[in-house]
Image (cartoon, helix red, strand yellow):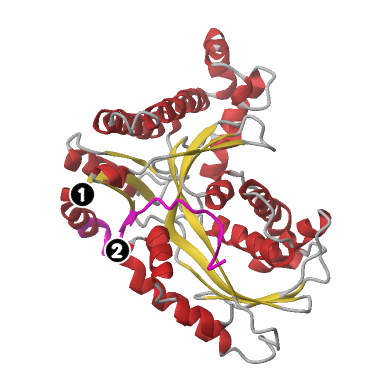
Amino acid sequence: MTGKEILDHLNSPASTDLFTSLYGAEEVDAVRQRYRRLIEELQDLPREDFPETSGELRVFSVPGRTELGGNHTDHNRGKVLAASIQLDAVAVVAPRKDKQVFFRSVGHSDVKIDISDLSMREDEKGHADSLIRGIAAEFAAQGTPVGGFTANASNLVLSGSGLSSSAAIEVLFAKIFDNLYSDGKRSALELAKMGQKAENIYFGKPCGLMDQTACASGGVVAIDFEDFQNPRVKGMNFDPAAIDLALCIVNTRGSHADLTPDYAAIPAEMKAVAAFFGKTVLRELDEETLMTRLPELRKAVGDRAVLRALHFFSENRRVEDMLMVVQKLKALPVEAMGMFLTLVEESGDSSWELLQNIYSPRNPAEQGMTLALALTKNFLGGEGACRVHGGGFAGTIQVYVPMERLEDYRKLMEGIFGEGTLTVLRIRQLGAVEVFA
């Protein structure tokens, strides 16, 4: 479609239905304005950034994701329950006939690279250039040479909130290349792997595959990482809003500075427990075996490592229990949702008590998440549930709040942590997509 055709199409009933499914009915007007602005800004780019093309424009959207269960289990080949959300990265794209990529994203510096050279560059590590080059290199390695594009993007996935803003961008690049130059034939998992590989090798940051998989897949997905290279991904039908529960995150606005050692210690300590038994990761071990040598293990790895291993085993079981409960939701919605919320609370308590990722032990004076969880439990009085969200130590908590109490809860949290700290999430059924295709 041309830019004019897309602009004309934005107000059509078909677009209304599509935007409602992606973002919710209350956001349709704002979404139209967002798309219109991106298209018009792209068309106004200087000719050196937006050279002559066929006039065709393509629009792509990739959602962020939220973790519903399985806190810090993926790196030890565990199980996770995650969902894509309405907050997304959108790009309006013009295919090019050369090998140049121009990528503009609101709030970020422009990216201009030549992908005729796909070699890794040390000076690009940590920058978006490396992700584009790394994903293009993976396409080439798979026998699909890719060309350039010009894109104008907007990423509304909140940064630093555990919603996987970076993974959404990685999958966005992979989806653009795949649809422009490979007929969009790759699966969500294949796109996720490309994003992960580019982040690991070209960007220079170790990461698992959970974030990219959830962003690419759409809806609620159960992911089993027993085979780390080929995880099992199963879609689930689950939406707390269907029974009047708001799924929220609260950003306590704690500093993420200097938390790398805290994050790194969790997988390292879990793997130290596994190594004591001659294993690589905890998934290769069972809890009963661990308990038989507990006195020796404590001396070898320390009590915190043992506690974190116990969290892994219990959290893996909880994800399985969550899946069984979700399957009962249609027949027994109220009863099953009560069971689900109990499991959410248990997950949160396990992270708090065993995993110990609610605050940094190196900075005990800053405990925003601890405070938010304590106040939330008191506010809910057993009516909803709450847990840590994402990596922990600082940042966000996840909360299920009865709809009729949402605004009171918002006032409580924003009165303490500041305006705009509460975000209501909506589960989105579509993962990485080309809009209007």
Indicate the position of residue 71 as horizontal and vertical percent values: 46, 37
Residue 273 appears at what percent x and percent y? 59, 23
* Count of numbered marks: 2
Q: What stretch is highlighted in magenta?
A: 415-437
In which quadrant of the rendered view does residue 26 lie? bottom left
Which badge, 1 or 2, is on the more N-terminal residue? 1
Check disc 2 and report its element: helix, strand or loop: loop
Residue 134, image x, y percentages:
74, 60
Which mark's residue is nearer the viewer, 1 or 2? 1
Which residue bears the numbered disc 2?
Answer: 420
Name the kind of residue labelled 1 in the image.
Met
User: From where the camera sits, is residue 170 visible?
Assistant: yes
Residue to which mark 1 is pinned: 403
Q: Hey, what amino acid is under mark 2?
A: Gly
Location of residue 368 with respect to 165 vertically, above or below:
above
Left or right of residue 47, residue 386 in this image: left
Q: Badge 2: how crowded within 10 Å, few (<14), some, or many (20+)?
A: few
Q: Which residue is drawn at 48% across and 81% down?
A: 7
Report helix, strand or loop for mark 1.
helix
Residue 278 within the segment the image draws in magenta: no
Disc number for residue 312: none
